Image (cartoon, rainbow, N blue to C red):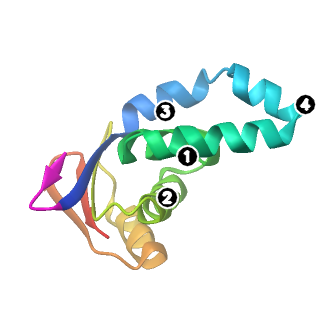
Amino acid sequence: MKHQGKICIEFDYTSFLGASGSKKWTFVEAFSTIAPIFGLLWKQNIAELSKPEDRLWEAALKSMSSRQSDESNLVKLVKLAQHEGIQELRVVMPYSLDSEQIEYIEARSQLKVDITEQDVLNLKL
């Protein structure tokens, strides 16, 4: 979604947790292990055509894990969003984070976490 020229993305962390646990290899990923240059060129072309939220989702599936802590995953998500040029990130959580988790995220990402609704984190990157 766009707001006043800024790229604002909503990331559903609940859906991510479900998807990361059942991630299957795609044809491109499998073929890339055999011919890495093919995968690199294919991914570059696809990335140019896809939307920032789609690229963020794909990057999250590759670098975040349901086996890692939520805090670590959210810090990684912030870095991925920054890399994609996203200025605002709205993360819908399956549950509320406690104050220590919020402090960890703020310290590692050097951003202020704003909680406007229950279980929704807002970050301005």
- Residue at mark 1: 59
Where on the picture, by quarter, is residue 24?
top right
Helix, strand or loop for disc 3: helix
- Residue at mark 4: 34
Residue type at mark 2: give it.
Leu
Earlier sequence position, callout 3 versus callout 4: 3
C-alpha span from label 1 to label 3: 14 Å
Residue type at mark 3: give it.
Leu
The x, y position of residue 27, in whole percent, is 71, 20
C-alpha span from label 3 to label 4: 29 Å
Magenta residues, start to end: 1-5
The x, y position of residue 98, in whole percent, is 33, 58
Q: Sort mark 2 into few (<14), some (14-19) or many (20+) by Cα contacts within 10 Å.
A: some
Count of numbered marks: 4
The x, y position of residue 120, in whole percent, is 22, 48
C-alpha span from label 2 to label 4: 27 Å
Q: Nearer the viewer, residue 27 or 18?
A: 27
Q: In which quarter of the image is the N terminus?
A: top left
Q: Do the residues labelled 2 and 4 touch (CB within 8 Å)?
A: no
User: Can residue 92 be seen?
Assistant: no
| Magenta: main secondary structure | loop
